[in-house]
Image (cartoon, rainbow, N blue to C red):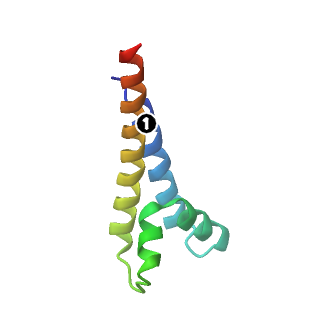
Amino acid sequence: MKYTYTLLLTIIGAALCLMHMIGHDSDPVYMIFYSLSVPAWIYSLYTYTHINQALLYVTTILSWTLIGYVIDSLLWRKKVRH
């Protein structure tokens, strides 16, 4: 099984976190990060005010990696069945 989407989405998650880390004060960057980060959606539901940024970045990258892995495994299963 090739892990093409896993690697690609991990890179996207890391780039998203790096972009947020560098441009945290910019409103468009802030909105992009919180729109595309699944853990940030969960944190916003509980209205936490003091979030550990490192934990948020790690969980964001892991969630993008997990999404990529699920895509890769579904494509692999489809290829094996046919």
Above or below, 74 relative to 53: above
Q: Secondary structure at mark 1?
A: helix
Q: Residue at x 54, y 67 (%)?
A: 34
Residue 7 placement (x, y as % from top left):
41, 37
Residue 66 placement (x, y as % from top left):
36, 46
Q: Nearer the viewer, residue 70 or 81?
A: 81
Residue 69 placement (x, y as % from top left):
36, 38
Q: Residue at x 47, y 77 (%)?
A: 44
Q: Residue at x 67, y 68 (%)?
A: 28
Residue lying at the far top of the rendered structure: 82
Decide if residue 47 is on the left or right side of residue 30: left
Q: Residue at x 39, y 85 (%)?
A: 50
Q: Nearer the viewer, residue 58 or 81?
A: 81
Above or below, 5 relative to 51: above
Amino acid bearing label 1:
Ile
Mark 1 lies on residue: 71
